[in-house]
Each structure stands twice: as C-alpha cells, then as structure tokens.
Amino acid sequence: MGDFEDLKTTIEREYPGWLVWRSDAGRWYATRNGDLTDAQLQAGYAMTVASDDADGLCGLLAEQARRSGGER
C-alpha cells in the first residue's frame, strides 16, 4: 500500500466515523468519532482498534462494521 496520508484518507472514507492515526512506533490505530453505549461495549464494539499494518487495521474495522449490521 502507499504512503500514510493516502492510506489514512482511503480508510477513513471506507469506514466513516473512525479517525485513523499511526504511532511513533509505526502501529496503526483507528478511534471512533463518537461514544458507544454500555450495551455496545458489552457486545464487543471497540472505541479503538490497533494493528501492525493498514491491512490488519482494515480487517478490524470490517469486523466492527459487521457487528453493527454492516454500518460503517
């Protein structure tokens, strides 16, 4: 995949409601823009997901989208 800014923009377009960032160590993160309810948290929704690379992050975001019935 390409450079960080291009990937960040692509991922955030594909998964609206998430802010993507990368740590100084190079790990990829996505954090939701809004809050989750206690019920959503108990159901396995995550406020923040992390992966070693962009592909892994997209997989985690897709899993979160499936939890919400496909809503991204």
Image (spheres, rainbow, N blue to C red):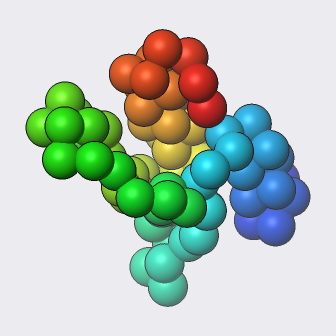
From the image, which quarter does the C terminus lie in? top right
Q: Residue at (55%, 61%) from the top-left corner?
A: 33
Image coordinates for residue 30, horizontal then vertical, percent: 51, 58
Q: Residue at (42%, 31%) from the top-left corner?
A: 64
Q: Compare residues 46 and 34 and report the one nearer the observer.
A: 34
From the viewer's perspective, is residue 6 above or below residue 23? above
Image coordinates for residue 58, horizontal then vertical, percent: 57, 37
Residue 4's quadrant in the figure? bottom right
37 vs 6, left or right, is left
The reply to whether residue 60 is visible in this rendering is yes
From the viewer's perspective, is residue 67 above or below residue 56? above
Image coordinates for residue 21, horizontal then vertical, percent: 59, 70
From the viewer's perspective, is residue 66 above or below residue 24? above
From the image, which quarter does the N terminus lie in? top right
From the viewer's perspective, is residue 13 above or below residue 44? below
Q: Residue at (55%, 71%) from the top-left corner?
A: 22
36 vs 57, left or right, is left
